[in-house]
Every structure is written in structure tokens, then in C-alpha cells.
Amino acid sequence: MKRRKASERVQGLLVMLPWLFERKRVRIDEMARTFGLDRDTLVADLTMSTFCGTPPYSPLELIEIYFDDEYVWIEIPRIFTRPLRLTVEEAFTLKAIGEAALAVAGDSTSSALASALAKLPDAADDAPVVVRQPDDPKLAGLGDSAASHEIVTIEYFSPISEKSTRRDIVPMRLWVDGDHWYCDSFDYLSGERRQFRLDRMEKMERTGRFADPSGLPTLPDEPGFNWSADADVVVLHLKPGAHWVAERYPTRGTKKLQSGVLEVKLHVANEDWLGRLLVRAGRDAKVVAPAKYANLAATTARRIRARYA
Amino acid sequence: MAAKKTAKKTTAKKAAAKKVAPKKAATKKPAAKKAATKRVDKPKDQAERLLNLLAVLTHDSNYRTLEDIHFATNMYHDRSLFERDKAVLREMGIPIDAIVLGGDQAGVSSYRIDRREMQLANINFTNDEERALQLALAAVHVDSAWAERARLKLNLAEADMPSGPQVHLPVNSELLPKLAAAAAKTVRVEFDYAGGTRRSLNPYGLLSRGGYWYVVGHDLGRKAIRSFRIDRITGAVKTTTDSFERPEDFDIEAAVATDAEMLGDAHGAVARVLVSAKLAPSVMRDFGEDCVVERLDDAVIVAVPCANRPAFRSWVLGLVAGAEVLSPPEVRRDIVDWLDSLAGAR
């Protein structure tokens, strides 16, 4: 059992007890999963709470929780029946989520969402929290296709090779991260799951043909960049002038070395991507490993330099 | 959920129920166990103590002295233990009221917790509102446990994976809620910013754009509206009690320069850049259609601000071999020098 701070256990219980009162009887496994605890930890914490009550501590004033092998239940609500108020962190997170969701929600859900948000505590404060997301005219069409597993034909542009490819894809999930919209898709050209940036789709045509959903790959629960297991990881040393690299791209870890040099590990989408990054970072970035990328900045620079002959 | 067969429940309880209470000595007869739980003398575990302290202080609206609390709970022979527990509860955000008594107990502190202050107020969501919140929580991914905690407190079920668009919006810095709270209360804050400068700011609001969060407000040192990237604030944010008024016409989006705007400055130096036709649409998205000054067969010439040289260089090199700076000569020279120094580097 992982050692946790007392305040963490108590805060957890103050969320768990009202939740359990609300349901009266639940499967222990389900409750453990809901609260991200292992079964033993959950049972230990709930058991601890049964030592708790109010004066004069007769059995009538103690929290009563029962277990059998499968279920946990609570009979008479006594204390801690209401959850704690939202912390400033929780309230802010809800507000930010609400703002982000309003920007992508359809009209029908956005009015319900807006009125739900208005009912949250402190909703009246009028300091702006604005979540700005990029817009893309292809969003609605791709969303419809994703919902119906419709095959769409796209012309997809790679800024690095400066070439477009025409491909049939089944859009599966649209998501936005920072400046760009992405579409998790099944790609018939490569025969595998691929991610496409919406602003690089030069053309998008709906075909009216539909894929069998059972043949589509499964997506991870949360959207994110999918690095294949064999994707390269590059280790870079960044002087302060190139620290933006560590801020801009998801890293696999950063370490501050002496004299302000930052060591970062980055996933490499492909060699061209890394070359472009290195030429922008200039001499403030140095490839430490793997050796095959040691000359990449120089070769990319020569390729661009050829235009200035 | 509430509908349960009473008969079945009773049977289950008689057969298997364990009121799990006293340590390993748990017997299988419920009655015996209830009796055992009466023992509340000096629990050793801090979590257990905190929970009991909370229970006493929220029991009714009466104030209690440490002596009262110890009399009821038998937990605090040692005052320092009580002080420590009280501090932990306050750190958890639980509001403990304290008063100092007069009369024959003059000078003695007395405590209580107002349950209404501590608990979440009842919120009656309509079905549609509840559903909309569930969907929002499922569609927006924040990289912190705060959303999940809030969902459980609000007693919202977890929605299935949404079919609509999803958002990755990191909300995982404690500075964000802190600055938002200061903006809501309209009080000045202070913090150290990248480069080691101490800033004093009247925070007007927060903006998330392009993968970064910004706090925007009136910078008292610079006497101007400034925006600060949250991830570049070093150390803690100090919230003061100095209040301010937010201008009514404040437009937070206009106050934060976009990437494209960052390339220029008020004096407006402009570079002419030859961009291959393939890349032209993305350049036009960043700088507007008006940036195109000439259309060639397989390329366009665009006019782009270049006063901020490092930002301009990073932008134009991001187009790799798809772009060439034509003028002004010193800007073209700068790019060539940059490339030469890299091309020669090992």
C-alpha cells in the first residue's frame, strides 16, 4: 500500500463518504476504480472512518459501513453526508473545461452547458477566463463523417517534403491541442491508424461510402500524439536561446545541467521534422544522441542554403 | 438505486455483513463489532484524528475550546498535536472559525466549523444541464486530478467517450487557480518572471491560446497592459490585498499578441519572402490574404513583419526550403549567416 499523507486520505474520504451515502450500496471494485485506489486501500480508509463519530461516541454516533466480499454499504447517514465545497483549483478547472467545451459544443448542448456553469458556486465572478481555439471549416464535415464512419478522401500536405498525397481515410476522433486540430483516423494508404492535422488537409471530400466500424482500430481513451513503440527518442542539449523547444513540444523528460543547459528527450516524429526543429534552434541546440542525427542540423541548413546561392 | 428489496438486504447482512471496525480483532457478529467501535481513545493515526476533529467541530454551532475537544475525543493530551491538526485542516481549505473567550475563560481560544461554509451547496441541475456537464468533462482533458475530484463532488456520472470533438487543455499549474482567484477578487499580485524580473500586476483575466496560458493585466512597473505566460512565472505568486478596478472595455484577446504579431513592432520593418505555392495557404492563414504582394506561377511573394529578428528567423526557417527571404538585404544576410554557421557545424 502506497504511503499517503493524512490530509490526502481525509480529503479522499470526504469525497467518498457522500458519494457512498448517495448510492447506499456499491461494488467494492467499482468504488475503488472510481476513486483510483486499490481495493485494500479503499477498504482500509473506509474502515478507518468507522472509528469516527461525534460525542458521545455511542454506536449511534459512529459512521457505519458494512462490507461483504463484493459490496460495501452504508445505512444511516450521520456525518460527512455532503461533499466539501469545491477548492479553488477544482472550481477553476470546471470553469476552464466549460469554456473549452462551449467553444466546440453544438448549439443544443452549449445552452444547457452555459446554464449548468452558471449554477456552479462563484459563477458570478466576472473576471474573464477565455479559452481560444483554432477554427477550421472542415470540422463540421469531418465530425459528421466520424460519427457515421464515412470514408473521406483527403489531399494531405506535408510541409517538410512539400508534397501532397491523396488518401482515403475514416475519421475517428477530432481533437484540438494548442494551435491545431487533429483527426485520429484509419488510413487506407498505410493500412494503419494515423493522425492528420486539419489545416494540412488541402481537400476533403465525403464519399458517401461507409466503413464497417468493427474493422476499425481502437483508439486510446484520451486523445494525444501516438508515438509508435519504435519511434526514436532524441536527446538534446539546449542553451537558454533554445529553451523554447522544451516548452513547445511534449518531452519525455527534462534535466537542468550546469550553466543553464537543459537536457531534453523528445520523440522524433520523423527525421525531417527534427531537421526543421534543429535548424530553427540553431547553434543553441545540440544533438547528444543518437549519433545518426548528429549532422542533421548541418544537412538541413545546407538544403535551405542552396536556395540562397 | 434506492429501490432495494429489504428482505434480501437483511439476509445478506446477517449472513456476511462485517461492520469492519476494530483492527484485527474483528469478529463476525455485527453486534459485537458495534460495541467495539465505542473505543475512541487516542487514535494514533493522524487521518483518523483529523476526521474526528472535523466531526466534533462541525457537530453543532457551538464553539469549543481545546479542553472541550479533548474531553470529547480524548485525542489531545498534547496541545502541539492539536495545533498541527488544525493547521492541516486549514491547509485543506476547511474554514475553522476561532474566537477568544472572555469572562472566566478570558484569553482562551474557542473553535468551530460552519458546516455551510465547508460543504458544497446543493445544486439542482436539470437533466440537460447534468448531461452537458458530463459531456464537457469527458471531452476536455486537463492533465490533473482536479476535474475528476470536482466531478465526484458534484456526483456526476462519468460519460462514455464522447463522439464529438475533444480538447486537450492542460490545467495543471497551481498558479492558474491562484491568479484566477486574484482576478476574480480584483487584487494585485506579485511574481518573478522569466529573466528574473519582479512584476507587480493587477490581473484582469486569463487566456488560453496556442497551447499556453497567459495572465493579462496592468503591469504597475511598466505602467501598461502586459501579458505573461504562466509557465514562465518562476516561483510562487504572492496575492496582496490591494484592490483595483478592471476597465469595463477590457478585451483580453486583443491584449495578447498572436505569433504573427510577435514578428513585428510599432516601427514596422517588413521583409519580402518568396514562398512556394504549396505553403502559401498556411502563410496566408497566419498573416491574412493581404500579405501577398505578388503571385508567380508556382510561388507567391509575401510581405511579413520582421522587426523581431529571432521570431522572424524561426518562422521563415520553419518553412524549410519552401521559402527564401528576398529583402531587405540585411535580413537575407542574417538568414544566410545563420545557415552557414549551422552548415559548417558538426
Image (tube, rainbow, N blue to C red):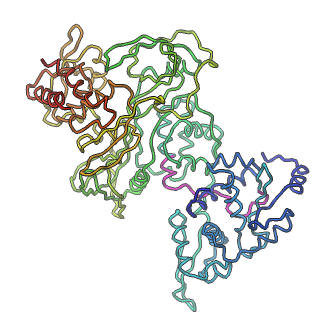
Q: Give how far across and how far down residue A146 sits, in percent.
A: 55, 21
Point out residue A301 in the picture as x, y percentages from the top left corner: 21, 25
Q: How many marks?
A: 0
Q: Is residue B254 visible?
A: no
In this view, B54 is above or below A8 = below
In the rendered structure, the answer to whether residue A293 lies left or right of residue A210 reads: left
Eyeballing the image, is A109 above or below B181?
above
Identify the image quadrant of the N terminus of chain A: bottom right
Is B5 displayed left or right of B209 in the figure?
Answer: right
Identify which residue, A232 or B336, lies in the foreground: A232
Give the magenta range. Answer: A74-93
Left or right relative to B18: residue A257: left
Q: Which secondary structure dominates the residues rendered in magenta?
A: loop
Give percent across and percent down for residue B58. 64, 69
Position of B341 relative to B191 (above/below): above
Coordinates of residue B317 in the picture (x, y in percent): 23, 27
At 27% from the left and 38% from the top, the residue drawn is B257
